Image: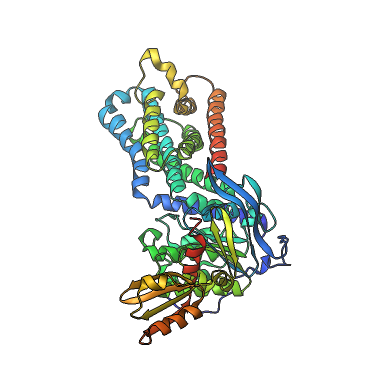
Amino acid sequence: MDGSTRLLRTYLAEAKYESLRTLRMPAFGIPFLALPVSLYLLLAVLLFGDAIRGDPHGAVYMFTGFSVMGVMGPGMFGFGVLVALEREQGLLALKRALPMPPMAYLLAKMLMAMLFVAIVMATMMLAAPLLGHVTLSAIAFLKIAAITILGALPFCAIGLFIGTRTSGKAAPAVTNLLYLAMIYLSGFLIPLPKGVQWIALASPAFYLDQLALSAAGAPSHGTTVMHVIVLAGVTLLLTSIAVRRLARVG
Amino acid sequence: MQRMSVELPPIANPETHPGASGAPECDGRLAELSGVHKRYGSTVALDGLDLHVSRGELLAVLGPNGAGKTTTISLLLGLQKPDTGTAMLFGRSPQALESRREIGVMMQEVALAPELRVREHIDLVASYYANPLTPQAAMELTHTCALADRPYGKLSGGQKRQAQFTIAICGRPKLLFLDEPTVGLDVQAREMMWSTVRRLVNDGAAVVLTTHYLEEAEALADRVAVLAKGRVIASGSVTEIRASVVRTRIRCCTSVAAEEVAEWPGVTDAGIDQNRLHITAINAEAVLRRLLAADPDLGELEVRRAGLAEVFTELTKDEA
């Protein structure tokens, strides 16, 4: 087996087993797989279904909003909580001592988060046209799927940053706090009061929501380039800080 | 527990045997720390430590808590860097991936993913190596086939150690780090692990063993390094280390008072335990002659040289 084949085998094995173990964790998998679509059905279908029926943009806002919520969870918690726990429990030190290529661990978790997001988006894209009065072309749905699956990466980076700096006990609380604050402050589920709407600019979730809205042809703020730069910047900055810390202190 | 049923491939990696690979070694030394100093804040962890392990050698690193064992292993594994001095693994930095492809690691404080089965854990770690054993062959070697399909989180403490040991050897390492490998194992499982370790060493691999069980070091080690306060205070074969502290233990049933014996020349300690007089002596022959002269009715006499445990206590009593 040559070097590159072996490397590929390592990356694939790491990604396979990371996804497998996470899918076997019902406490982790079920909330992130079921919560976004459940809340979407509750709010966009049962409670406000009648109002949305006559408001195509409102239906899209609901769809992209809950989709972004579904994107945030696996990355933030998969990295934030699991990395903190694995650091504390010595698993990361063992992996650093073993001949695991340094990026295999991170890429495996990123792929796991993207797999979860793909499952979330599959359920959302089934529910939205059937029950949520969303009328988009197949191309628009595919664009939104691609944006949201890649959109998991900045939230992986945020989670990784938390996971490298908090203890296993503190990580769930810190991640939850940031997760809920970001959902609220992005204004994509509950509109912010007019005077403080600017605060959404500080939340990466806002930019992802704008990208998805733009792909759906709904009114959005800012430009695609700006949104991509912000999301890529957050991903690269926080990942590089966290990776340096992991290499130094584990 | 399953017995070996098939002929197993050699554990030592044929692709990484000396002369077959580009891995440089200095005088057969696979890993080496030279003049290493390491501090954590104001605490000195290592104070000019020199240590090496050579091919085909089992080195036991012993020392009281806080002696610097964990830091020593962390430096050799590349988890930390020395403040001053050098750490080398296969002639390179321990942080180089190429160096670590030659090692296997079993750590003491580690929780593997509880959701994965033992076979899956082995398959994952085996994927890091160039020429690993198959999970089946690794489990046959360590007699853990019965654990193959069990989730790691459902194993007992001893079974987890057995699974970790299998993971440590699955890459056919040239150098194996074992940190307290037999904690929680029953006698049979411990003997099986020891026999696999011996087989590894016979096949040309080196092992660095840290253990609190001195009988484990006594049973396995070619060489022992005793650490205290971040330095090596004694190093050599078990026999040499034992000879460095000449102590003999005498036990008998006698009417001679312990307080009286404690005053005799050559006696370092004397006391009564379970109605027997226990003496630790440097000059055992002279003490015995005097003891027999003082009490012709003396009975149930036992004389033995100090074990590694007693030598270890003696060596480290001023250093801990």
In the rendered view of the protein, which quadrant contains the N terminus of chain B? bottom left
Measuring from the top left, give residue B303's x and y in whole percent.
Answer: 45, 80
Q: In the rendered image of this protein, does residue B156 appear above or below residue A192?
A: below
Residue at the limit of the structure toward the top, as seen here: A195
Residue sitting farthest toward the bottom: B296
- Side (left or right) of A148 relative to B50: left
Instruction: Judge whether residue A34 can be spotted in this image.
Output: yes
Which residue is more in the foreground, A37 or B56?
A: B56
Instruction: Relative to B285, say whether B106 is above or below.
Output: above
Camera-side residue of B286 and A29:
B286
- Residue A210's spot in the image, x, y percent? 47, 25
Q: Quarter of the image holding residue A192? A: top left
**Residue B226 shown left or right of residue A61 in the figure:** right
Q: Residue pushed farthest left?
A: A47
Q: Could you tell me residue A184's position as x and y percent?
A: 36, 25
Q: Give left or right: position of B256 versus B284.
A: left
- The spot of residue B86 in percent (x, y) is 67, 51
